[in-house]
Image: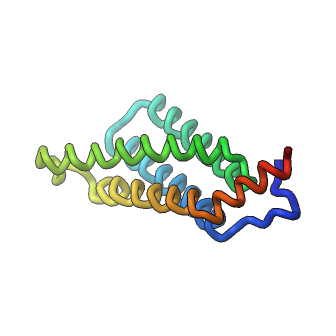
Amino acid sequence: MSVPTAVSRPSAVKTAVILWYTFVGLAVLSLIITVVTNDSPRSVASLGALVLALVAGCTNKFREGANWARIVLTVFGALNIVANVGSLAMLLSSGGVSEVPASALILSTLLPIVVIAALAFSYRREANEFFAAVKASHA
């Protein structure tokens, strides 16, 4: 499915796509840091890579106007926000911040911010109109 020629992709959707791809890149970096610093098993890296590949695939479909992809990214984004904020809260409350690499703390803070921004752009008025127009063009 591609965007019909009569439907132009608004800047809100373009920005959301950039933010979702930024998330994927930062999450790959975070996954690498986690695997290297924690001697995590390959299964953790494989699962993380699979999830990120699915997010990238959904982002491609999102860019084309697939509303189901927007819903999947929303659910994934909400889970990611809860997980990252929860991890940060646990680290800060336990005093274990000094034992965590600074890069991991920065990424754990940055990832939910990127997701919140991506979700905000995903549901702006012009994005909603874009998804409705794409759906109407396929009816």
- Where is residue 116 drawn, in percent x and y? 44, 57
Answer with the quarter of the image where residue 14 lies.
bottom right
- Where is residue 132 drawn, in percent x and y? 72, 53
Q: Quadrant of the C terminus?
A: top right
Q: Residue at x 57, y 63 (%)?
A: 124
**In the rendered image, the vertical position of residue 61 relative to residue 50, given as above or below:** below
Q: Residue at x 52, y 34 (%)?
A: 46
Q: Nearer the viewer, residue 116 or 106?
A: 116
Q: Is residue 58 left or right of residue 106?
A: right
Residue farthest right in this picture: 5
Q: Nearer the viewer, residue 33 or 122?
A: 122
Q: Is residue 13 left or right of residue 139?
A: left
Q: Residue at x 33, y 60 (%)?
A: 106
Q: Is residue 112 left or right of residue 18?
A: left
**In the rendered image, the vertical position of residue 31 relative to residue 121, given as above or below:** above
Q: Residue at x 45, y 32 (%)?
A: 44
- Where is residue 93 drawn, in percent x and y? 13, 47
Q: Nearer the viewer, residue 54 or 36?
A: 54
- Where is residue 31 drawn, in percent x and y? 44, 45
